[in-house]
Amino acid sequence: MFGVVQDMPQVSEAEYRLVESHLGPDRPAGLLAHVSGPMDGGWRVINVWSSEDDFRRFQSERLIRAAGLAAQSGLDPTKAARFTALTVSGEDMPF
Amino acid sequence: MHQLEYWNDYAGESWARNAGGLEGLNAALGARALDVAAAQPGEHVIDVGCGTGATTLALAEQVGPTGRVLGMDLSSPMIEVARQLRAEAGMRWVGFMEADVETAALVADSFDLAFSRMCLMLLDDPVRGARTIAGALRHGGRLVATTFRSAADNPWLPLVVMGAVPYLDGLPPLPLPGEPGPFAFADPARPHHVFTEAGFVDVHVEPLDTVMKPDGAPEDVAGLLIQLGPAGGSYLRAAEDRQAAARAGVLKLLAAYRDGDGQLSLPNGSWLITARRP
């Protein structure tokens, strides 16, 4: 399993939803859980994936494109460019 | 994609083909470091990740014909351009070596100064690379290097990717935190640890803020910027209309970074790293 915590300082919920709207309707392959919500002055996304490869594929094939489309349609691109990510690799729970 | 493959595939070929324009972009990233390095006449200098050799030749100007400068890069097409520029400059005291600093066999204790512009954060094992550099320096020899800070300090880098990719066929896998990539040294503790672990002393990591003001029409500059990064391969494979759309997409996202004359003016946040072999 592979976890990613992505913090986007200064990004509002509306701006996050704009990016989300460009991701398309299909659930990303390998995405097990998704939680997002406000953090201090920004927005935090926590995703758990079946594997690191699933996340990498989602990032390079969909997420960056969606952020680019959101930036073209109104998201302040400098906000989209300011993010940090924490990743965690580990095993599934034994039950 | 491994760095060796990346820099000998489209990236290296693209940088080699556009050496003049790209140096116009990158010159600001190394100018201050060259001043700090202050290579002296007669010194022996190694330039790690020399690319097409502009910094190597600048260091050669500083040391003069009584000195020696060795430029090293793992990109075959870029080293080929560097050798051509050296021949045109008539600088016989400059040599170039196609090698990866992590595995290169360098003569021990042979350089007074190691210089590197925007390379060391790309190494798979930067401590190993730094150890190679330390071993090649004489005791008391100095290191001067620049690396990128974070994406937030260099917003043009992610903006170029985001601006271009909606019009292109995807990207190669992007680096995760801590992996080799432009922002691998974003936390100043990382380069400090790397060079200390490699045996350097007096390791200083200081912010260096510059502004890149590339010459040329902004649309042409946008094309170069796309080719610099992970969207470069997709861009070069794309049809002309898609390439034009990608350039326009980049310029739209970089609108905040146009000066009064409409030229791009891109803030760049680097670390200036200095250290010494004991």
Image (spheres, coloured by chain):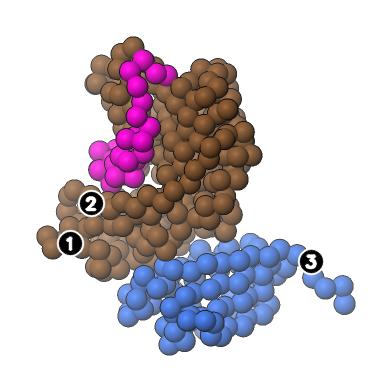
Chain colours: A blue, B brown
Q: What stretch of residues is rendered in magenta? A: B15-44
Q: Would you call the spot at circle 1 few (<14 residues within 10 Å), some (14-19), or many (20 or more)? A: few
Residue picked out by circle 2: B213
Q: Percent x, y for residue B212?
A: 27, 51
Residue at the far bottom: name it.
A14
Residue A57 lies in what quarter of the image? bottom right
The answer for which chain carries disc 3 is A
Residue name at image x 32 percent, y 41 percent? B32
Q: Measuring from the top left, give residue B91's x and y in whole percent.
A: 29, 17
Q: Nearer the viewer, residue B51 or B16?
A: B51
Left or right: residue B238 compared with residue B9:
left
Quote the CA–CA distance across marks 2 and 1: 9 Å
What amino acid is found at the position of numbered circle 2 in the picture? Answer: Lys
Amino acid type shown at disc 3: Glu
Q: Secondary structure at mark 3?
A: loop
- The verdict on a common chain for dots 3 and 1 is no
Q: Which residue is mark 1?
A: B259
Q: Residue B213, how many percent across, how many down?
A: 23, 51
Give the number of the disc on residue A91. 3
- Name the amino acid, label 1: Asp
